[in-house]
Image (cartoon, rainbow, N blue to C red):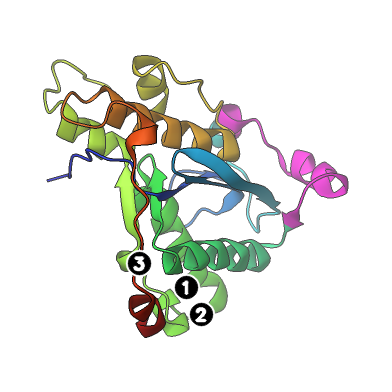
Amino acid sequence: MAKKYLRVPELIVGFDTETTGLDVATERAISYGFCAYRYGKLEWSEQFYVVPDRAIAPAAQRVHGLSLEDIETKRGTDSVFSVPGGLARAVDILRRYQEQGAYIVGANVVRFDLEMLRRSYESVFAKSLSDESFDLARLQVIDVIEHDLAIEPSRAERPRRGLEYLCRHYDVEPGGHEALGDARATVEVFIEQVVRNNEGQIALDLVPAIEVPSESVESR
């Protein structure tokens, strides 16, 4: 059962991808979005694109609006990677924030975004992420859809729990099916979920700074 969070963790990282399609076993991410918030304040963000090694499904393109030509034209203004380069960059970011104790926030992020990342990495590099001493299962993950079910379990009350619905419900600006925009939206939805929960904090300035003893840091 999903945990109901009564406090916003000190460091949270929104994560989202746009992809060539919906099959996590065969499709690829074509854009990655990350945004890090410390004490509820944005401190860093990054979005980059990937030239896929397979076609973008028409249904997926209708959602995110990205064609192969669109991605190619971004080379002059944005970071554009090959599939291996994009995977390596995404893993590097996740590993870096995992080491800092961050919580990864997303919508359906474990079953879709992270699972596609894991399978794509195995397919492209012919080895698992565990061979790189990086275990996705050890990531601290908050899925705003699962979190909403913990807050309001009644599916009759809220029959739909997708990110667009949650943005409307919590008065958050939608991300527009853009990786960075959706990553930002998931973080803002999560913050609103906590703030509006009567048992939770009522303002972000109530989040205490947690001091980690120096010996604990050195022992990691």
Amino acid under disc 3: Val
Q: CA distance from mark 2 to mark 1?
A: 5 Å
- Dominant SS in magenta: helix
Instruction: Give residue 112's mark.
Output: none
Question: Who is closer to the viewer here, 166 or 19?
Answer: 166
Mark 2 packing: few (<14 Cα in 10 Å), some, or many (20+)? few
User: Compared to 89, does 35 lie above or below?
Assistant: above
**58 or 178: nearer the viewer:** 178
The span picked out in magenta is: 61-80
Query: Residue 85 location in percent, x, y?
Result: 67, 66
Question: Residue 47: horizontal and vertical position, in percent?
Answer: 65, 46
Q: Which mark is residue 212?
A: 3
Label 3's element?
A: loop
Contact flag, marks 2 and 1 (Cβ < 8 Å): yes
Closer to the observer: label 1 or label 3? 3
The residue indicated by pointer 1 is: 122
Residue 196 left/right relative to 97: left
Q: Earlier in the sequence, mark 1 or mark 3?
A: 1
Where residue 126 is drawn, which disc sits there?
2
**Amino acid of disc 1:** Glu
- Amino acid carrying mark 2 in the image: Ala
Q: Secondary structure at mark 1?
A: helix
Q: Earlier in the sequence, mark 3 or mark 2?
A: 2
Q: Is residue 187 left or right of residue 55?
A: left
Residue contact at pointers 1 and 3, CB within 8 angstroms: no
Residue 93 pos. (x, y %):
55, 62
Quadrant where the image shows the C terminus: bottom left
Q: Residues within 10 Å of mark 1 (few under 14, many from 20)?
A: few
Which residue is pictured at 64% across the width and 48% down the height? 46
Taking depth in this image into account, of 128 and 217 the one nearest to the observer is 217
Q: Is residue 86 left or right of residue 112?
A: right
